[in-house]
Image (cartoon, grey):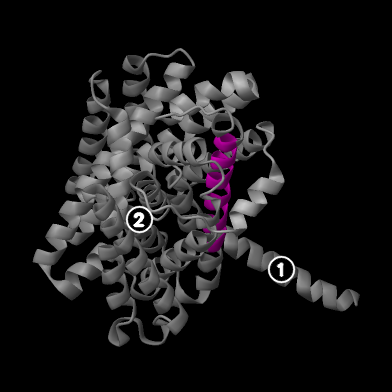
Amino acid sequence: MNGNESVRNPTLFRNLLIFLSVMGPGIITANVDNDAGGIATYSVAGAHFGYSMLWIFIPMTLVLIIIQEMCSRMGVVTGKGLADLIREKFGAKVTFYAMLALLVSNFTNTISEFSGIAASCEIFGISRYVSLPIAAIFVWWVVVKGTYKSVEKIFLAACLFYFSYIITGFLAHPKWSGVLKEAVYPTFRFNKSFILMMMGLVGTTIAPWMQFYQQSAVVEKGINVKDYKYARLDVIIGGIVVSIVAVFIIISCAATLFKNGIRIETAQDAALALKPLAGNYCSMLFAFGLFNASLFSAMILPLATAYSVCEGLGWETGVDRRLKEAPQFYFLFTALIVIGAGVIMYPKINLVMVMLLSQAANSVFLPFVLIFMLLLINDKHLMGQYRNSKFFNIVSCAAIVITIALTIAFAITEFL
């Protein structure tokens, strides 16, 4: 027995070391999804609809893991980013319009990240005119002056702070029997607000930028096919953790705000409203989580956009390259940060509308990205034996149909 254990333990230790070296793209990409817009969306869902939307996260987590696994697999097998493959397969014209749509979508999302930084800092008594310039400079410095490995370590460290929302959920003292019941039994209402919220939940949990960033990160990290099983585990862990955090945000707001009939418009409203209902610690943890998520996402979203657009247009990309080697990449990254932070400095902008519309826009754009992905990953010449299984294709097609159906349903309710 001792001999067997001595054989197993080195193997286990070796597998753990390989996983730790491969870990990153899946966990980081998934956790960035709980950004300022996401936290606002989950907060509103909990405050306005209670626990009734928790059931959505079971199928949505499965879809998220499958979609991100497809991106990771394409990156490992082809050694190219998603935008790069779209350009090669469908031509420059199609890629240009796809990148333009992604740029607009990601720009609104970037604005929402800086609005989250401003909102969370104002809860702690720091003016946005102080917090935003400091945050913008810090975000730019971390990425531009770092290497991929150093930047990834900072991103992974930021992921740990999302657990503050799980603590917040317990501090809110929810009725766990009600939570479990709503998580298992689906509820649906055919009205505009419910459908728009479902679109927001889908759009913020499975955002289109994620597929582009995930694949680019896998490629830049240089993960090879023989270590792919560890990259798949990275994706699975990321998908599960991000959904758990989102569920606890909804639980926090449902157990306190919905229970007391308090309606909110932003994550900042949620943090402030929690204070008299669940205590100062709960409120501060919620606000701290918002700051961490917003700062973290303010780094990733401009970076993901720069990766995607530059790949799609055939320009050099990557934080391991110097400014002279990838000028377009660094220019676009810097421009998004400067303009995104600058817009929030304007006091009269409707931050709520920007955040909610950016999440709904994600839901509208998502089916087009998934169609491109399905065509690419089922290409025999491109993927060979690593093509999609029938189950993956069925789930992906179902995700496309459902997201399109939600958009049509919302249009019908809007018209009626």
Q: Residue type at mark 2?
A: Tyr
One can see residue 41 in this view: yes
Which one is nearer the viewer's eye here, 38 or 129?
38
Magenta span: 236-254
| Circle on res. 12 | 1
Which disc is residue 213 wearing?
A: 2
Q: How many marks?
A: 2
Residue at 31% from the left image edge and 70% from the top image edge: 373
Which residue is nearer to you in this view: 370 or 232? 370
Q: Mark 1 or 2, which is nearer the eye?
A: 2
- Quarter of image, res 75: bottom left
Q: Position of residue 347 (x, y in %)?
A: 25, 18
Q: Kindly identify the amino acid type of the residue bearing the numbered disc 1.
A: Leu
Q: SS of the residue at dot 1?
A: helix
Q: Position of residue 143 (x, y in %)?
A: 35, 40
Q: Mark 1 packing: few (<14 Cα in 10 Å), some, or many (20+)? A: few
Does residue 191 sit above or below 175 in this rendering? below
- 353 is within the stretch colored magenta: no
The answer to whether 245 appears left or right of 121 in the picture is right
Q: Which mark is residue 342?
A: none
